[in-house]
Amino acid sequence: MTAKTISGEAFDAKFDAGEDIGDHIDWSTARRPGLEKRRVNVDFTDQMVRRLDIEAQRRGVTRQSLIKIWIADRLDGVS
C-alpha cells in the first residue's frame, strides 16, 4: 500500500483532531525510536531450559515471552 502524501502541517492537524492518519503512513518503513529490537544470546543450562519451559507452559506463553516478561519486571523494579 502506498501512503497518501500530505503536508506535515496537515498531518499534525489530522492527528491533533483525532482523525485516522493511517493512510498517510508507510507502515513497512515505520520505526519506533528507542524501541527497536536487538538480538542477544544467553546460554542456559538444560535444567534451566526445562524449568523455563514448564513455567512458560503453565502460564500459556512462549519461553522467549516468559524471559522477556521476567526481565522487564526486574528492570522496572530497579531505581
Image (cartoon, rainbow, N blue to C red):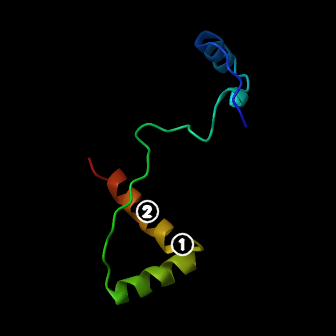
Residue most toward the left?
A: 79
For mark 2, give the secondary structure.
helix
Q: Which quarter of the picture shows residue 18?
A: top right
Number of callouts: 2
Mark-to-mark CA distance, 1 and 2: 10 Å
- In the picture shown, does residue 79 fall above or below 56? above
- Rendered position, 74 above or below 46: above
Query: In front: 8, or 54?
Result: 8
**Mark 2 nearby-residue class (10 Å; few <14, some 14–19, many ≥20):** few
x then y, percent, for residue 38: 39, 54
Please rate how many residues cluster around mark 1, counting C-alpha atoms within 10 Å: few if below 14, some from 14 to 19, many from 20.
some
From the top left corner, tell me how far across and down residue 10 is, in percent. 66, 12
In which quadrant will I find the N terminus?
Answer: top right
Residue 63 image position (x, y, % from top left): 48, 74
Nearer to me, 49 or 22: 22
Instruction: In the rendered view, tell whether residue 49 sits above or below residue 70.
Output: below
Which residue, given by chain and number where applicable, does mark 1 sit on?
A: 62
Q: Which residue is painted at 51% across and 76% down in the image?
A: 56
Residue type at mark 2: give it: Lys
* Residue at image point 60% right, 10% down: 9
Image height check: is 64 above or below 51?
above
Q: Which mark is residue 15?
A: none
Q: Residue at x 49, y 79 (%)?
A: 55
Q: Residue at x 50, y 66 (%)?
A: 65
Q: Which residue is mark 2?
A: 68
Q: Amino acid at mark 1?
A: Thr
